[in-house]
Amino acid sequence: MKNTINIDKLKFDEKGLIPAIVIDYYTREVLTLAYMNKESLEISINEGKTCFYSRSRKELWRKGETSKNYQHIQNIKSDCDNDALVVEVIKDGPACHTGAESCFMNEIYEKENYKDFSVYKLYELIKGRKINMTEGSYTTYLFNSGIDKILKKIGEESSEVIIGAKNDSKEEIIYELADLFYHSLVLMVEKNITLNDIKDELSKRSVVDKKVKKESMKK
């Protein structure tokens, strides 16, 4: 059950501000820490895009007003004390004024076995290989070779997934699926299709139910 509260019950500080942690709706990455007052929060809710209060300029500022990197709000939650907010957004571009995807980019500590990997970061890496052609890069080689080469590799990897499954080897299936997925990402970048496009398409349909319904109709 959702606990919806009136914004009048939020605890703004002595300056009338409340910290707002902005996170990416898709990747769950922390994008920035900003501040809102009651007015900017109301604007954010009414317009569906983030509006903050600048402590340095002492004025309201709508994210993306000049950069066009708007942040479309999906959800706003307060913490248990109602003195801090988490704002989930779908962003149109980088969150940081430096051009970085997130304002949190400077490493201070990292556990030795920490694995900082995500599909989104892999997608961005592949996209970077197309924009800045890196000599000796296999990904760059695929882009230089063109769509036919990319499609040929997807066909080959699809066949190898099937062979792995027929061999009943979990390790082989995982290995070949990873290859297929990688080459599919290359195709997506080539055709300017984003991961969010795929996620949105899947969210619009009940994949399992529709598949079951179609299979039932065939019988």
Image (spheres, helix red, strand yellow):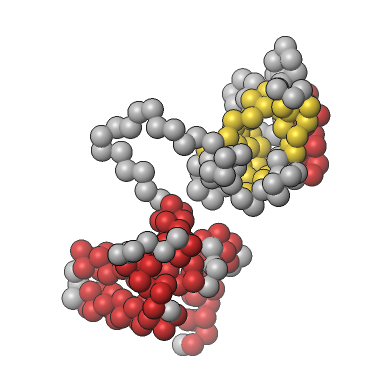
Instruction: Give the left or right position of residue 47, taking residue 183 as reference.
Output: right
**Image quadrant in which you'd find residue 103:** top right
Residue appearing at x 35%, y 71% in the figure = 141
Give the answer, above or below, for where 28 lies relative to 122: above
Instruction: Give the left or right position of residue 137, taking residue 213 as reference.
Output: left
Give the answer, above or below, for where 64 lies relative to 202: above
Residue 20 visible in the snapshot: yes
What number of labels is visible? 0
- List x then y, in percent, for residue 209: 52, 70
- List x then y, in percent, for residue 34: 64, 30
- Of residue 141 and residue 15, the one placed in the foreground of this image is 141
Residue appearing at x 58%, y 35% in the figure = 32
- Of residue 62 and residue 43, the one placed in the foreground of this image is 62
- List x then y, in percent, for residue 192: 55, 68
Instruction: Give the left or right position of residue 132, taking residue 10 as reference.
Output: left
Residue appearing at x 20%, y 64% in the figure = 171
- Of residue 5 and residue 48, the one placed in the foreground of this image is 48
Give the answer, above or below, for where 171 lies relative to 100: below
Q: Quadrant of the N terminus?
A: top right
Residue appearing at x 40%, y 32% in the figure = 107
Give the answer, above or below, for where 3 lies relative to 116: above
